[in-house]
Image: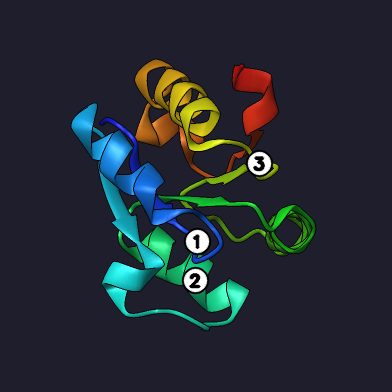
Amino acid sequence: MTIRLYLDEDVDVALAAALRQRGIDVLTTQEAGHLGLPDADQLTFATRGERVFFTHNRGDFARLHQEMMREGRSHAGIILSDQLPVGVLLRRLSNLCFRLTQEEMTTRLEFLGSWG
């Protein structure tokens, strides 16, 4: 199954449109009506919808991932990135999405910088 993304509210919505033009299934927090939802709830929503969560909030989501692993809980995957130009994010995310499957991302934490 191909990766389906859920973009955190800190991600430029222009990225969603660009990803869609490449055929990647994307949902934004704005479209889902989840602005301001706590981090754990955002990740739960993404996991229930079988979507990999993409965010620039590296510290909080790395911690949340570690807590979940300690507790034996799973998620649909988390991708972390510094804030970069949309074109750079598009290239790296496309690379990741076309090389990994949804199943391979399950309970995985990826740093987008590795996909440059």
- Amino acid type of disc 3? Ser
Q: Earlier in the sequence, mark 1 or mark 2?
A: 1
Element marked by disc 3: loop
**Please, is residue 43 above or below residue 103 in the view?**
below
Residue 102 image offset from top left, x and y in percent: 37, 35
Residue 90, quarter of the rendered image: top left
Residue beneath label 3, please? 81
Read off the residue under disc 1.
8
Q: Is residue 46 above or below residue 111?
A: below
Residue depicted at x 41% and y 61% = 46
Q: Position of residue 78 (x, y in %)?
A: 57, 47
Q: Is residue 18 left or right of residue 58?
A: left
**Do the numbered discs 1 and 2 sit on residues whose CB atoms are within 8 Å?**
yes
Query: Can you tell which quarter of the image residue 6 is in?
Result: bottom left
Is 98 on the left or on the right of 70, as rendered?
left
Q: Reply above or below: 1 against 62.
A: above
The residue where tag 2 is placed is: 42
The alpha-carbon separation of the residues under discs 1 and 2 comes to 8 Å
Disc 1 on helix, strand or loop? loop
- Residue nearer the viewer, 56 or 1: 56
Amino acid found under the numbered disc labelled 1: Asp
Residue 57: x percent and y percent? 69, 58
Q: Closer to the N terminus: mark 3 or mark 1?
A: 1
Amino acid type shown at disc 2:
Gln
Q: Nearer the viewer, mark 1 or mark 2?
A: 1
Quadrant of the rendered structure where residue 40 is?
bottom right
Residue placed at 64% from the left, 52% from the top?
56
Does residue 68 appear left or right of residue 29 in this picture? right
